[in-house]
């Protein structure tokens, strides 16, 4: 079978073992993964938790479902939101995606 594939012989002098670059590449990948994905996501989550903790009566909000309204009453887990005149719904505190500037609902 040697006439189809020439035999390969290992060069004993060239096999020095794994180099520094073999270990550095996965470490560099992990650092990049942390800096580009994990750290920004944790910063966003921290800012979102702070926004939800700072909710107060009278704030104008948007829920995850896209419902816009004004907070009438707020408890630990739920809040009462007026979405139209005399239309009141109860939503969970965690479903708030953003707080609108004051007066936004009157402009819409």
Image (cartoon, rainbow, N blue to C red):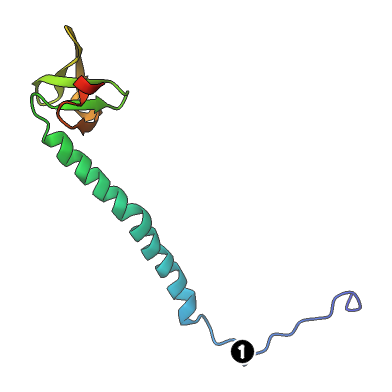
Write the residue at 33% across / 53% down.
38
Residue 54 location in percent, x, y? 11, 35
Quadrant of the rendering where the C terminus is positioned: top left
Residue 98 location in percent, x, y? 23, 33
Write the residue at 39% across / 59% down.
33
**Extreme-front residue of the structure:** 107
| Residue 86 figure quarter | top left
Residue 19 location in percent, x, y? 49, 82
* Tag count: 1
Above or below, 16 against 2 in this view is below
Asked whether 54 or 85 is in front, the reply is 85
Residue 6 location in percent, x, y? 84, 80
**Direction from residue 44 to residue 23 in the image, left or right:** right
**Extreme-top residue of the structure:** 86
Q: Residues within 10 Å of mark 1 (few under 14, many from 20)?
A: few
**Direction from residue 2 to residue 63 in the image, left or right:** left
Quadrant of the rendering where the N terminus is positioned: bottom right
Write the residue at 14% across / 29% down.
102
Residue at numbered disc 1: 14
């Amino acid at each position: 079978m040697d006439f189809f594939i020439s035999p390969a012989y290992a060069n004993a002098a060239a096999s020095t073992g794994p180099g520094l670059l073999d270990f550095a590449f996965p470490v560099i990948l992990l650092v990049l993964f942390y800096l580009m994905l994990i750290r920004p996501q944790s910063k966003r989550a921290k800012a979102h938790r702070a926004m939800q903790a700072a909710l107060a009566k009278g704030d104008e909000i948007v829920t995850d479902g896209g419902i816009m309204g004004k907070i009438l009453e707020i408890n630990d887990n739920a809040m009462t939101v007026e979405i139209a005149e005399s239309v009141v719904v109860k939503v969970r505190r965690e479903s708030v995606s953003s707080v609108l500037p004051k007066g936004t609902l009157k402009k819409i």
